[in-house]
Structures are given as structure tokens and as C-alpha cells.
């Protein structure tokens, strides 16, 4: 059949329109039958099938616990701000004789005063405004302030201890504050949940979760204090914030990280809260720390000497010297003794001994078990105040 040019043009335009219309009608019919739902294809689907099952799942229970811990501590973790006036030397070129001669004597500049600001974290330990943080957060600063829920308070430094890196602050709140719940760090085990709340890089009340990676780390720094290791994300600004257990109790004070880049690499360290309890109590009462002393210097026992004594391994602490008329000397201890227990608690290394003596209350009597010529001996030593610049 021959069609003239007019009808050919009509067919050229009409056929595509009819095809598109037919496809659209068929799509709507299919949609009405439930095989394709246009509304559900763009962000309006029904609830995920996992959501209905979530309340009965263990994962959901853990998530709810995390939420409750944040709600419990959101008003107890604080933002610590510091200010320090520092003298800054001018650029070296300003002191160069040639530059002064070339540009004139007006180029000379003396030291300039600048304001250096810092920040960290802390947590409330009493309703009336005592706050725990790290010594290194507030060391040497001129002013400390604390922010709690966008309310800023001037803070006084009650006391600070560089050995344990713990400091106690005091603010004057207008209302009762919400202190944290202090746990027992001796109960912490590797694999326990570990939760950090703090202000990394100034990001207020950041909540991170991990596990306890190790306990009893006493080789973290020269101080030799015990640390809890965790892989919960800790970064600059977390210092002084709490490390929290899954039961909602503070088990440590976040202190430092191991890093080659300056940022988080999966290894962080916290001061055990039991250490903090002792230090904070003394700082509150005396504004300084009084440490125990019995008058001995000790070292790790050598493998050869351990074999001579019949010891498996090289646990214990070798007594290298004794101060004359000291508590240890009065109790009858001698150079060469190997201390293996204090108050019937095993001594794995000389660092354990130092820590236990430091923590012993001044005036108390401790029982020391030592080996002398393979024979166990018991000494009852009264703890004295450690003189400055001495170890034990």
C-alpha cells in the first residue's frame, strides 16, 4: 500500500508515542498486581526484616548497653582547656649581625610573649566539683577551665603527681554534679569490653569502643607504672578521660598512645583506676603524694642467680643495697636476698615490688618473704615516708 508523504509523517511521529504509551500502561498494570512497586523503589521501603528481630538479639542488647553507658556518662566527662604564657624567640635571622647591619638596628627583636592553648579530657569524681585528669594535661599552665555541657568553670589545681600522671582539679559548680562510678581495675581481664569517652582533637564527648588488649603493662615509660592496654580509639585530646567497662564503671584513665604518626594506631594505654583512687585521695588531703619507703634498692634477678637459688625463671627482686638504719635494715634484711612475696602476693619483677611498696600506707607493717641461700625467710617491715630523690 502506498502512502503519500503526509501520512508517512504522521506514522513517523505516532508510532513511537503509541509504543511508549503502551509500555507505560503495562507498567502500571503490573504495579497494581504487586509485581513491581514504584513507590518502594525510591527510599520508601518497608522496615528491614532484621529490625523486627533486633530486640531479641544479643547484638541489639550490647548496642542498648552502649547507649545506656553514654547516657550515664555524658554529663560526667568534661572538656579541659588550658592556657599558658610562653616566651617565643624571634627568627634567628633577626639576630644575625649582617642582617642588622644591612637592614638597620631596628631589626633586633627580643623574646615575644604568646598565649599557648591546650585541651584534654577529665571526669567528675565528686558532686561538689572534684575532677580527675592527667598531670601532663595541666603541667606548667597558667590557667585551667572546665566545660560541662557548654557551661564553663574556672578550675583550680588541687594537686598533681608526675610519677603516675594524675592530677586533681576543683571547680565551684552551681548545682550537684554527676560523678562517675569507680570500678576495680584488679578485676580487668584481657578481652573485656573497653569504652573510651573524651575529646579527641577537640571533638566533645566522643565515644569509642574496643577491648582490653593487655593488662599490667609496666614497660610503657621510664616511670614503670602499670597500664591497661586497649584498642579502643584514643587520640590527642583523650588524655585524662575515662576508660569504662561494659558494666558502666571506670576502670582506667586514658593516658597515652603508641604511634609513629602522632595519631591512633590501635594501641592505647590507661592508668588503672585503683592507682588513681590512692593518688586522688592523697592529693585531696595533702595536695601531694607521700610514697612508702623501706630503704632498699632492687634489680631484676639474673638467670644464673635464679638457677643457683633453684627458681624457675627469673621472677622476684634482687636486693642490691640496703640503707643503714632504714626499715629494711632494722628488720634484718641483707644484700643478696631475693624478695619473692609481699603480704603473700607474688613478685614477678622488681617493678612489682616498687609499686607495692609505694602504695603501702606510711606507718603500716608489711610482710616480706625472701630467699636467702635457698631458704625462705619472713621479715616484718614498717613502711616509712620515702625521702626525695630516693627509690625505696
Image (spheres, rainbow, N blue to C red):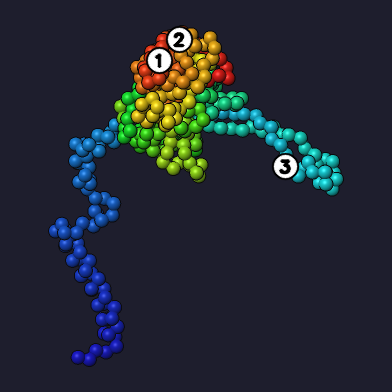
- Residue 366: x percent and y percent? 41, 12
The residue that disc 2 covers is 331
- Kindly tell me whether residue 149 is visible in this rendering: no
Q: Nearer the viewer, residue 202 or 148?
A: 202
Q: Nearer the viewer, residue 236 or 6?
A: 236
Residue at position x 59%, y 29% from top?
Answer: 83
- Kindly tell me whether residue 46 is visible in this rendering: yes
Question: Do the residues bearing badges 2 and 3 touch, measured as CB atoms within 8 Å?
Answer: no
- Residue 110: x percent and y percent? 76, 35
How many numbered marks appear? Answer: 3
Disc 3 or 1, which lies upstream in sequence? Answer: 3
- Residue 194: x percent and y percent? 35, 33
**Relative to 260, is 39 above or below?**
below
Question: Do the residues bearing badges 1 and 2 touch, measured as CB atoms within 8 Å?
Answer: yes
Residue at position x 53%, y 9% from top?
Answer: 325
The residue that disc 1 covers is 368
Q: Nearer the viewer, residue 96 or 110?
A: 96
- Residue 146: x percent and y percent? 51, 25
Residue at position x 71%, y 34% from top?
Answer: 112
The residue that disc 3 covers is 91
Secondary structure found at label 2:
helix
Distance from the alpha carbon under mark 1 to that under mark 2? 10 Å
Disc 1 or 2, which lies upstream in sequence? Answer: 2
Relative to residue 278, is residue 59 drawn left or right? left
Query: Which mark is nearer the camera, 2 or 3?
Result: 2
Residue at position x 57%, y 26% from top?
Answer: 139
Secondary structure found at label 3:
loop
Q: Nearer the viewer, residue 335 or 78?
A: 335
Amino acid at each position: 500500500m502506498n502512502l503519500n508523504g503526509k501520512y508517512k509523517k504522521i506514522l513517523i511521529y505516532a508510532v513511537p508515542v503509541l509504543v511508549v504509551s503502551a509500555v507505560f500502561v503495562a507498567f502500571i498494570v503490573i504495579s497494581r498486581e504487586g509485581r513491581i512497586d514504584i513507590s518502594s523503589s525510591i527510599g520508601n521501603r518497608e522496615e528491614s526484616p532484621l529490625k523486627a528481630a533486633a530486640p531479641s538479639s544479643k547484638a541489639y542488647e550490647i548496642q542498648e548497653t552502649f547507649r545506656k553507658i553514654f547516657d550515664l556518662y555524658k554529663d560526667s566527662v568534661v572538656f579541659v582547656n588550658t592556657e599558658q604564657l610562653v616566651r617565643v624567640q624571634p627568627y634567628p635571622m633577626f639576630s644575625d649581625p649582617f642582617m642588622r647591619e644591612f637592614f638597620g638596628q631596628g631589626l633586633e627583636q627580643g623574646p615575644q610573649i604568646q598565649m599557648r592553648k591546650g585541651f584534654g579530657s577529665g571526669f567528675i569524681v565528686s558532686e561538689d566539683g572534684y575532677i580527675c585528669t592527667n598531670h601532663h594535661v595541666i603541667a606548667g599552665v597558667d590557667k585551667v577551665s572546665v566545660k560541662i555541657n557548654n557551661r564553663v568553670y574556672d578550675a583550680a589545681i588541687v594537686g598533681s603527681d608526675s610519677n603516675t600522671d594524675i592530677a586533681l582539679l576543683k571547680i565551684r559548680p552551681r548545682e550537684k554534679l554527676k560523678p562517675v562510678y569507680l570500678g576495680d581495675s584488679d578485676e580487668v581481664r584481657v578481652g573485656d569490653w573497653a569504652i573510651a569517652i573524651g575529646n579527641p582533637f577537640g571533638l566533645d564527648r566522643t565515644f569509642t569502643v574496643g577491648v582490653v588488649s593487655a593488662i599490667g603493662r609496666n614497660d610503657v615509660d621510664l616511670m614503670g607504672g602499670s597500664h591497661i592496654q586497649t584498642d579502643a580509639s584514643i587520640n590527642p585530646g583523650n588524655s585524662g578521660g575515662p576508660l569504662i567497662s561494659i558494666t558502666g564503671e571506670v576502670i582506667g584513665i586514658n593516658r597515652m598512645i603508641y604511634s609513629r604518626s602522632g595519631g591512633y594506631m590501635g594501641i592505647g594505654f590507661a592508668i588503672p583506676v585503683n592507682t588513681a583512687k590512692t593518688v586522688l585521695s592523697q592529693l585531696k588531703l595533702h595536695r601531694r603524694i607521700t610514697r612508702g619507703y623501706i630503704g632498699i634498692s632492687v634489680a631484676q634477678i639474673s638467670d644464673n642467680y635464679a638457677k643457683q637459688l633453684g627458681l624457675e625463671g627469673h621472677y622476684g627482686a634482687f636486693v642490691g643495697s640496703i640503707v643503714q638504719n632504714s626499715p629494711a635494715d632494722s628488720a634484718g634484711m641483707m644484700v643478696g636476698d631475693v624478695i619473692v612475696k609481699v603480704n603473700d602476693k607474688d613478685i614477678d619483677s622488681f617493678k612489682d615490688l616498687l609499686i607495692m611498696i609505694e602504695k603501702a600506707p606510711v606507718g603500716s607493717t608489711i610482710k616480706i618473704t625472701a630467699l636467702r641461700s635457698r631458704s625462705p625467710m619472713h621479715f616484718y617491715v614498717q613502711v616509712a615516708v620515702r625521702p626525695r630523690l630516693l627509690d625505696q
